[in-house]
Structure formats: structure tokens, C-alpha cells
Image: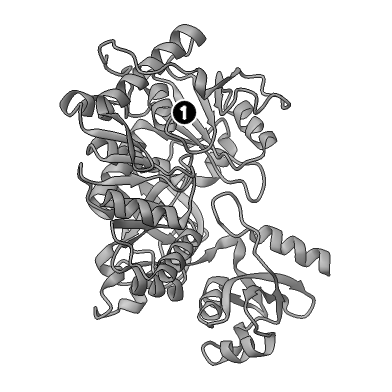
Amino acid sequence: MNIANWLHDQALCHPRRPALFQGATPVADYHGFAARAVAIATWLGERHGIAPGDRVAVFMKNSIDYLPVLYGIWWAGAVAVPVNAKLHAAEAAWIVNNAESRLVVTEDGRTLADHEHKQGAEIAVADLPAAGDNAIVPPCSRHQDDLAWLFYTSGTTGRSKGVMLTHGNLVAMSLCYAVDVDTVSSDDAALYAAPMSHGAGLYNFIHVRCGARHVLPGSRGFDAAEVLDLAKHLGRVSMFAAPTMVKRLVAEARHRGEHGEGLKSIIYGGAPMYNADIREALDILGPRFIQVYGQGESPMTITALERGRISDHDAPGWARQLASVGRAQSCVDVRVVDDHMHPLPAGEPGEVAVRGQAVMAGYWRNPEATEKTLIDGWLRTGDIGFIDEEGFLTLTDRSKDVIISGGSNIYPREIEEVLSLHPAVREVSVVGQRDPEWGEIVVAFVVADDVDAETLTRWFTDHMASFKKPKKYYFCDELPKNNYGKILKTELRNRLEALA
């Protein structure tokens, strides 16, 4: 089962259906999309000797070429190694080496020239062939357990690891989208404003299978005004967005006096979306939001909180469910376990574990990490949370982020939720700092407008137990984030060490 079969099927059944758009301009139909993939696959084999199972890296920003390049790699039976374009060239070179890529596609063919990448040649995307006139031959036959996508984790705590995603993993993830996240039709348009090397790119598959449109913004990234304009022009636009992107989109719509006309669905995930922010988003843009929780190791596919649950203010338990990340998706089992992998009862916090068809095959050539992470088929996520009696999973924190102060476990997420409700607070991140008396104390890094620590402490103790309140506040202009918009708590802890 080659995931590229889905594009082949669309090219045969609906060849003139519009497929690729540069902004609002159509660039290729499904026949042209598939023909380009076939041309690239043929060229990879004939010019560079790429064979089934070989790795081909892609290190470039979102572009109209990105999907044809990926499908050309899969058509040839090879493995795609998409690398986030925001990484430093040295980081990208390390990934290319670690994956033992035979080839790396970059913007200009010289991006990694100053860095050792001895596993293969670097070629410019412009050197790849255009669509030919030859018949669209079927993709190379692959088994569902064959590797398709080698995804490198963000590596915020050290060297990133290569997550092995098979063709079967990608199929399971995609079918879950249609069942648990959102329906897809040929009238829809998938907008790629977040990096296609990550979650946004993974959602291409179900949109290809359903013959939807694929839209690359002219900015090649996220611009809130551009998203709103494209949505109005194209209609039925769906997109994946990190919480920081949602906040900027809501701010732009509010500024323009608009309500997201033409936007069908905004799937958010990748970092916490605080209740105050999603409530404001609903007020401005309406019932367009769906939450997903997943990891690279179980791509976009652990739980989902559907549109109706998020938008139905009058439903019993709405506020509690809104604070959750939803219920298990169709292709996985989800449980909360103790340190010995024993399942915990409803309401008791522990580590989230997931098992199912979407879970990775393991880490690329890293059996030690695989053995620690996959236990009898269960993926240990490293996330702490609890499942209520209705099956809704609420995350409290990453296991490494829990603060133990005076013998009590304190979860930064709940403190951040309370502080983010203050009207002056724009962003907040809470970490623990070593303390000789308490073991650890709670420290809050805050981006805010005209507010002081005393005011925030009064606000906090009006809403939550005093023993959880931050002992220190650090006010800053911005919080450090990685390439996917996640706040780097490791860097915040390093700042505290430097200040000590």
C-alpha cells in the first residue's frame, strides 16, 4: 500500500479537478499534479539511482513544488525526510546525515554547501523536471509496514530523533481525520500556512484522497490578513494552526471587523490553547474550531475535540470539556498509566499512553530510545493528564515540567490557564526553579501590558489555591519558541540558572 496510490487514483478518476493553487491562482489539476510526481520519480531513479527504501530529504520553505516533490519521492518507493525550513543549516545537515539521505532538495542547491552532508547530493528544486506527457504509471508497490515519512522531532531537549512513519501509519492517521476531526470533500481547500514538514503537511493525504484543492499562500507562510483574504476568495478553506497563529488570526479579524468568511475549519494543536483564547476565538470567528492532540510518534492522532463540543456553550460540562483535548480517535487506544504502565482509574493523573495503527514503527536506528518509549506496543508520550468518566482526556503538563514544591505536585498548565485570563496578560509560561527550602518554587514568565507582580498575585489567589501561586514573576517582551511555535521551557529554566 503506497500512500501515493491516492494521488494516482484521483488523476485517473478526476484528472481535470483543480489541485494546486498559488494563492488564489490555479496552477495544476490532478492530472498535472500526478504527472509532475511521475516525472520527478523517474528522474530520481534514472539520474540519481534512487531505489525503494532510499531516503530523500526536503529542506525548503512551503512552496507550490513541495507536494509534487513529496509524491515524486513516494512514487519512486523512496522515503521522504521533510526538514523544517526554519532550522539552521547545521541542524538540517545533521538530520540529512542521520537519515543517510541519498539526496537533499533545497531552494538553490547550495543551502548546505558549507556544512558536511556526506550522504548524497544537494539539488535545487528548480532542477527537478516539469510534468511530462507520458502516461501516468502506477506508483512503486510498497507494503503498509514500509517506511514512508521520516519525521524528526523538534529536539528542544537535545538531538532530535527520527520518527519512522510507515505507509500504514499515514493511512490510519488520514482516515481518522475524516472520521474524528472533519469531513472532507472535493469542494474543500487545504491551506498550508504552517510548515509542510510538520502537521500541516501530514493533512495533505486525506485532502488528496478526496480530491480537494491545495493552496500555498503567496507569502509561503502564515500571514493573518492573507489567510482571511484567501478564505473569502476560495471558500471552504481548512487549515492547521498552532495556537499562536490562531491568536494572530483572531486579532486580525477583530481589527477588520470580520468573522472569518470562507473559513470552513481551523484545526489547532501542537501546544496548549488556553480557555480564554479559544473563547475569544469562538466569539470572533464562530464554530470553526477543532482540536487535535498528537505527537510525531502518533502523528496528529491521539485524541480530538470536535467542532460541536467546542462551540456548544450550553451543553452540560462544556467548560470542562473545552479544557480537555477530547476523546480517543478511532484507530487508537488511549489510557493513563502509572510508572509501571498500570492503567489508572478515571480522574487520577498519570502519563498518557497510546496504542494503535497510527503509532510509529520506532525511532530511526535508535533501538535504545525505541525500547524506552514503546512498551508492549504502547507509546509513552511523556505527557501528564487524566481521563474523566466520559472518556475526555485533560492534559496537565509534560512529565518533565511538573513542579514538586513542598512535597506537592503543581502543574504549570493550570497556573498558566488562570494567569492568561487576566486581561493584561498576552502570554505566560510557568516553570520550576530549584529552592533549598521548598525543593522547587513556581516562577512565571509573563508577556503583559501594564501590570505588576502584586496585581497578578491578587488575581491568582482569587482563582486558585495560594500554595500554587508563583513566587517570582519575570516580565519580558516575548517568550522563546521553537520552529513550531512551542514555548521553550528548557531555555526559560536556563535563564533562571543564569540569574541564580
Picture quarter with the N terminus: top left
Residue highlighted by disc 1: 80
- Say which element carries label 1: strand
Q: Which residue is more in the foreground, 401 or 85?
A: 85
Residue at 65% from the left image edge and 83% from the top image edge: 450
- Res 393 quadrant in image: bottom left
- Residue at the spot x=56%, y=62% of the render? 399
Query: Residue flagged by tag 1: what amino acid is it?
Result: Ala
The residue lying at 60 percent from left, 60 percent from top is 487
* Residue 341 percent coordinates (x, y): 46, 56
Task: Decide: is 425 above or below 302.
Answer: below
In the displayed structure image, the side of residue 271 where residue 480 appears, left or right: right
**Image location (x, y in percent) of residue 276:** 45, 76
Residue sitting at the far left:
13
Q: Is residue 240 visible?
A: yes
Q: How many marks?
A: 1
If the image is split into quadrants, where does the C terminus sit? bottom right
In percent of width and height, residue 32 lies at 29, 23
Residue nearest the observer in this picture, 422 or 333: 422
- Extreme residue in the top direction: 46
Colouring chosen for the image of the structure:
one colour
The reply to whether residue 176 is in sight is no
Q: Give coordinates of residue 193: x percent, y percent.
A: 44, 48
Q: In this image, 47 relative to 471: left or right?
A: left
Q: Residues within 10 Å of mark 1 (few under 14, many from 20)?
A: many
Of residues 466 and 260, the one nearer the viewer is 260
**Pick the front one: 176 or 240:** 240
Tell me where residue 352 sits by quadrant. bottom left
